[in-house]
Image (cartoon, rainbow, N blue to C red):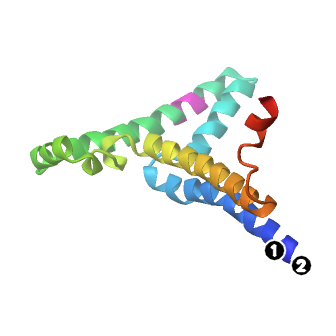
Amino acid sequence: MVRRLRNCRQALLFHIPCLFWRLLNDRSGININNLVEAAETIQNALYPERREKTIKYMIRHLDHYLEYQQGYRAGCCAHLRRFLSRGLFCFRVGNRYGNYLVTLYAATKVLYVANVAAQLLLLDLLLGAGYHLYGAQVIS
């Protein structure tokens, strides 16, 4: 019973970065799932009309997002935002700066790598001390 609980905990830890991405991905303003499905439709389209309609949909979706970005950069407090973003890194990251998805993707990958490292350390604790350098000891 304890072993099953431990395995469930480990599985949950591997699911956390995926949940992180899914929860925060929707706040970007770009519906990535729809764009990927549209790209697959373009790739598999048999009729040129269907292909053109899907391409126009994707262009319209991305244009809407880019217009939203331009409206933010030209607002009444644009100079203040630019001044703050030069001095403080935390003001440079965000949906309205256009780098939200890239930052979110990188943070998700960092969570995956940290999770793997933590899992290896937990496994080393479970097996006993000295196994974290086992591969190097076998080679030498």
52 relative to 11, above or below: above
Along the line of sight, the residue nearer the viewer: 116 or 69 = 116
For the residues bearing labels 2 and 1, Cβ distance under 8 angstroms: yes
Q: On the image, numbered disc 2 is attached to which residue?
A: 1
Q: Quadrant of residue 103?
A: top left
Q: Name the main secondary structure of what is drawn in magenta.
A: helix
In the displayed structure image, the side of residue 57 where residue 117 appears, left or right: right
Point 55% across, 60% down: residue: 23
Q: Report the amino acid beneath label 2.
A: Met
Q: Which mark is residue 36?
A: none
- Helix, strand, or loop for circle 1? helix
Quarter of the image where the C terminus is located:
top right
The residue under the point 31% across, 47% down is: 96
Q: Residue at x 77, y 42 (%)?
A: 134
Left or right: 102 in relation to 32:
left
Mark 1 neighbour density, 10 Å: few (under 14) some (14–19) many (20 or more) = few
Labelled disc at residue 5: 1
For image coordinates 58% across by 39% down, the residue present is: 35
Q: Quadrant of the N terminus?
A: bottom right
Task: Find the residue positioned furthest to the right.
Answer: 1
Front-most of residues 129 and 22: 129
Magenta-colored span: 53-57
Q: Is residue 108 left or right of residue 9?
A: left
Q: Report if residue 12 lies within the magenta region.
A: no
